[in-house]
Image: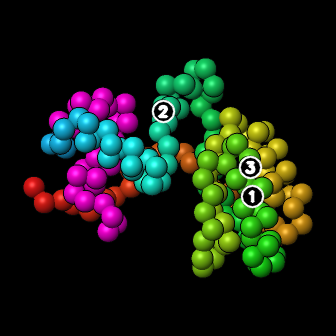
Amino acid sequence: MNDLDEFDVRILQELQKSSAISNQDLASRVHISPPTCLRRVKRLRDAGYIEREVAILNADKLAPITGYGLTALVEVTLDVQNAQSLDAFERRACDEPAVQQCYRVSPGPDFMLVIYCLDMPAYLALSQSLFSVDVNVRNARAFFSVKRGKFTTSVPLPNQKK
């Protein structure tokens, strides 16, 4: 983070709390002028520090409309772990909308997936298409969430001098 100064870090910290903040309010919170703030935010976006800005929906509040849904954490182990096989499975997993997060991990399984499905039949259909059809998947072990204790999208940033 050598190319980020303390103002950039403070901007990123504030935007992680809410990207809907106005430029005027953001500038005020990080103690810089609004035009300078706007230029810095654009530079942070262009440099890829800000990957995207999205609305994070509350699944519990949407449950009366969508159903409560099912969150599964799935360990996936492949038979062949060469780069081509790992890349191929990762692409397939990432192309699946129900896969919310995909991590290549070590040691142990090759991948950890966070999957969100509407219900168990939807998970079964997904697991058959993603794990059972792929002859390179040796094992897929699922853990189903019964309660979410914490969820955040914030990346820890270094503390700044006050």
Q: Tell me the SS state at disc 3.
A: helix
Residue picked out by circle 3? 95
Which class describes the residues within 10 Å of circle 2: few (<14), some (14-19), or many (20+)? few
Residue range in magenta is 1-29
Q: Quadrant of the C terminus?
A: bottom left
Residue picked out by circle 1? 91
Residue 43: x, y in percent? 39, 49
Comes first in the chain, label 2 or label 3: 2
Residue 154: x, y in percent? 38, 50
- Separation (CA) of disc 1 from disc 3: 6 Å
Residue picked out by circle 2? 55
**Amino acid found under the numbered disc labelled 1:** Arg
Q: Verify whether residue 20 appears in magenta.
A: yes
Foreground residue among 7 and 134: 7
Q: Quadrant of the N terminus?
A: bottom left
Q: Verify whether residue 25 appears in magenta.
A: yes
Q: Main secondary structure of the magenta part?
A: helix
Which class describes the residues within 10 Å of circle 3: few (<14), some (14-19), or many (20+)? few
Is residue 56 depicted above or below 105 in this figure? Answer: above
**Amino acid found under the numbered disc labelled 2:** Ala
Residue 37: x, y in percent? 27, 41
Q: Are marks 1 and 3 in contact (CB under 8 Å)?
A: yes
Residue 161: x, y in percent? 13, 60
- Separation (CA) of disc 1 from disc 2: 25 Å
Q: Are marks 2 and 3 in contact (CB under 8 Å)?
A: no
